[in-house]
Image: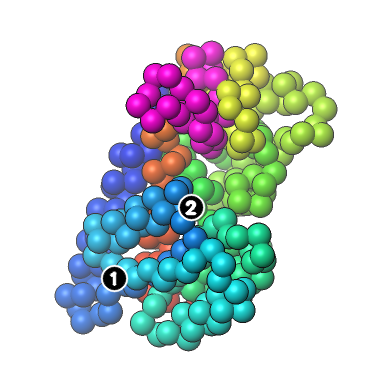
Amino acid sequence: MILIDGKKIAAEIKREIAVEVKNIIENGGKRPHLAAILVGHDGGSETYVDYKIKDCEEVGFTSSLVRYEDNVAEEELLAKIQELNNNDDIDGFIVQLPLPKHISEQKVIETIDPKKDVDGFHPVNVGRMVIGLPSFISATPFGIVELIKRYNIETSGKNCVILGRSNIVGRPMSVLMSQKSINATVTVVHSQTKNMEEICRNADILIAAIGVPEFVKGNMVKEGAVLIDVGTTRVPSAETKSGFKLKGDVLFSEVAHKCSYISPVPGGVGPMTRVALLNNTLLSAKKTIYC
């Protein structure tokens, strides 16, 4: 069993991006600029945006943060998004989710210029991904694909089962895994699927993204399978100072010994999601996706 080290791969990609940024600057180019809009004071969102700012510093990006209280009017937020769309110095930006209930997340996503949509959520980027055109790929799917590629995991002709059909992970993963560059045969399993355990047992590659802690048990995984655990649920724990512990969608103790490769939680897919944002911002700065 080989443990997939997301921290190690994320650090490698950051070093690669930093070298490329240095070369851009030395050749007279503009330093890539990533902006973030943060609404309210959600603890998780605050922490995540702080990480993004630190990541930008680490690779040599310029970063900026726009803050609003959680009572900001939807119209004011949309106006700011249009302002960032028209700011030539900003290569990409994100609006940190979730948003307050009075603001339409879908309207916010669709207002962002697809050329600056480094979260990869805009329907234009999703559509380009589906038909195989260059696009900004959302964070978690990007991270999973990079882990598979960098660990040289064989995918061509393999049976890939994706547990979960969310627009953030399951659906885009099903598209990416079936594309010609990966060539897996894909099955999407969800809450209404019959014979779920049997389907999962036939998977050469099982991607668990259902959001239920330790849902995948030993009887759902065949010997030698590759298992990517996307789950990150905080559960109460007396073992930690914080009183909480992160658990994945896989019961690691039952499953790990059966796998050829497995990603842990934490330390697997998670560190890769932040790198995706840096990668997309660099692509935007280089005008690689939209020439």
Q: Quadrant of the N terminus?
A: top left
Q: Mark 1 points at which residue?
A: 62
Q: Residue at x 79, y 23 (%)?
A: 195
In the structure shown, which secondary structural element does the residue marked by tag 1 occupy?
strand
Q: Which colour scheme is used?
A: rainbow
227 or 69, nearer to the observer: 69
Residue 170: x percent and y percent? Answer: 64, 45
Q: Residue at x 32, y 68 (%)?
A: 63
The image quadrant of residue 88 is: bottom left
In the structure shown, which secondary structural element does the residue marked by tag 2 occupy?
loop
Comes first in the chain, label 1 or label 2:
2
Q: What residue type is labelled 2?
A: Asp
In the displayed structure image, the side of residue 155 where residue 32 appears, left or right: left
Q: What residue type is labelled 1?
A: Thr
Q: Which residue is drawn at 46% across and 64% down?
A: 38
Q: Does the magenta stretch include residue 110?
A: no
User: What range is drawn magenta here?
Assistant: 228-255
Q: Is residue 250 magenta?
A: yes
Select label 1 or label 2 by which is in front. 2
103 or 206, nearer to the observer: 103
10 or 68, nearer to the observer: 68
Could you tell me how far apart the alpha carbons at marks 1 and 2 are, in whole angstroms? 24 Å
User: Is residue 48 in view from this perspective?
Assistant: no
Residue 20: x percent and y percent? Answer: 26, 65
Tally of numbered tags: 2
Q: Mark 2 points at which residue?
A: 42
